Image: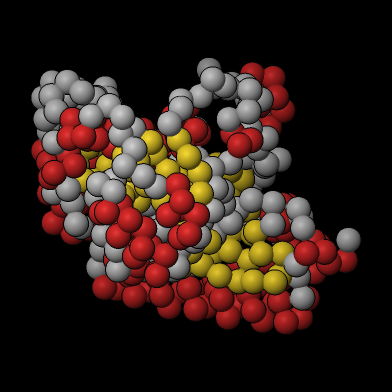
Amino acid sequence: MTEQVTRATFDEVMVPNYAPAAMIPVRGEGSRVWDQEGKEYIDFAGGIAVTALGHSHPKLVEVMREQAGKLWHLSNVMTNEPALRLAKKLTQKTFADRVFFANSGAEANEAAFKLARRYAFDNFGPEKNEIIAFYQSFHGRTLFTVSVGGQPKYKEGFEPTPGGIKHCDYNNIEQLKALISDKTCAVVMEPIQGEGGIIPADKEFAKQVRELCDQFNALLVFDEVQSGVGRSGTLYAYEQLGVTPDVLTTAKSLGNGFPVGAMLATDKAAQALGFGTHGSTYGGNPMACSIAEAVIDIVDTPEVLEGVKARHQLFVDGLKAINEKYHVFKDIRGMGLLMGAEVKDELAGHAKDFVAASAEAGLMVLVAGPNVVRFAPSLIIPEEDIKEGLARFEQAVAKVVAN
Ligand SMILES: *Cc1c(COP(=O)(O)O)cnc(C)c1O
């Protein structure tokens, strides 16, 4: 028998670490989603920057069904065709020579941080173990990834956390110069900070980070869990920065909602994770890899990537027009379809009000910290859904202003 469940059920049976919205979505198609009551929403959130090809994409549904009828799981005692095909594609399309598969962004980062430590240990000795990361950065919720992440609130009460980690202001090269040393094994950065407020790296800063890493024999790790898989307008954002990392992590959009993550690395760096050094039961399973392969095939085409740039402009123009009427945002910024609208100082802390008002108007948007409304829609969201969604967003803004 199927149990009847409502939002109230959450408060009865779930660990209270989330505070989900009042409605429960039950179905999605493209960039539209419907809840239990049949109310329709336009999806400018994409989960949290995950459903890059929208909901129920016919090709992805087909690939998933086909693989589900063949083989779900083998473990890494054996390899499988979808994992090998996906790894080939990812290495052909990026700087990387080798791939490790995981099931989430945090797990991909965990692998990257362990690789960085082990690489330094093998090549330079145990003293070289410091990781430098940036304030406001987000790298996941495991103990190691919250420790590398630059937001103290995620560590609070979970101490003792792993040591050997230092933080630096983003886009501040002088501070990095003061922190980096022969003890540094890696510098970890998001090419555009996502959760931290949609803040792109300056090109000149990124270039100098690369130079400092080379000077001190530290690996440069790019966390592209949010910015990757076409969201920035190129397959990975590093292509636009003109800086190549040694290690890159990718997840979120990679599976369009099916859990999968990957760490990409140069051959030289990858050698640090020799046989037996790291592993995962589910990582690289044929279901996840067949779906991710189809996502990459669809996203890495000129139509989709050029379309991201065109849609970026539609969003920016639309948001600017709304802001000219209501004067609520002091900055509208981002890369591709990862965009943020930062509220004016008078509205500091109130980005979440726009999310609530949008939901009422039939629109899903996100925050990125307390002051930024974030937009991370499907990369192939139809133009009419952008127009309709922006009209709903204008209603939401009007409501926030009226209150
Ligand atoms: C979401 C995110 C993560 C964590 O990914 P999970 O799949 O939630 O573990 C890590 N890094 C960045 C930049 C992210 O945006």
Of residues 147 and 108, the one drawn nearer to the viewer in this rendering? 147
In the image, residue 7 above or below residue 188? above
In this rendering, position of residue 132 left or right of residue 47: left
Where residue 248 appears, as percent x and y from the top left, is: 30, 48
In this rendering, position of residue 243 left or right of residue 266: right
Q: Is residue 293 visible?
A: no
Of residues 400 and 266, the one drawn nearer to the viewer in this rendering? 266
Where residue 93 appears, as percent x and y from the top left, is: 18, 59
Where residue 274 appears, as percent x and y from the top left, is: 14, 28
Q: Quadrant of residue 269?
A: top left
Of residues 171 and 294, the one drawn nearer to the viewer in this rendering? 171
Residue at the (28%, 48%) spot, across then down = 216
Q: Quadrant of residue 21?
A: top right
Residue at the (56%, 70%) spot, across then down = 333
In this rendering, position of residue 361 left or right of residue 383: right
Residue at the (57%, 21%) spot, across then down = 159
Question: Quadrant location of the C terminus?
Answer: bottom right
Where residue 360 appears, as percent x and y from the top left, is: 73, 55
Residue at the (29%, 63%) spot, across then down = 243
In this rendering, position of residue 156 left or right of residue 187: right
Q: Quadrant of residue 235?
A: bottom left
Q: Is residue 7 visible?
A: yes
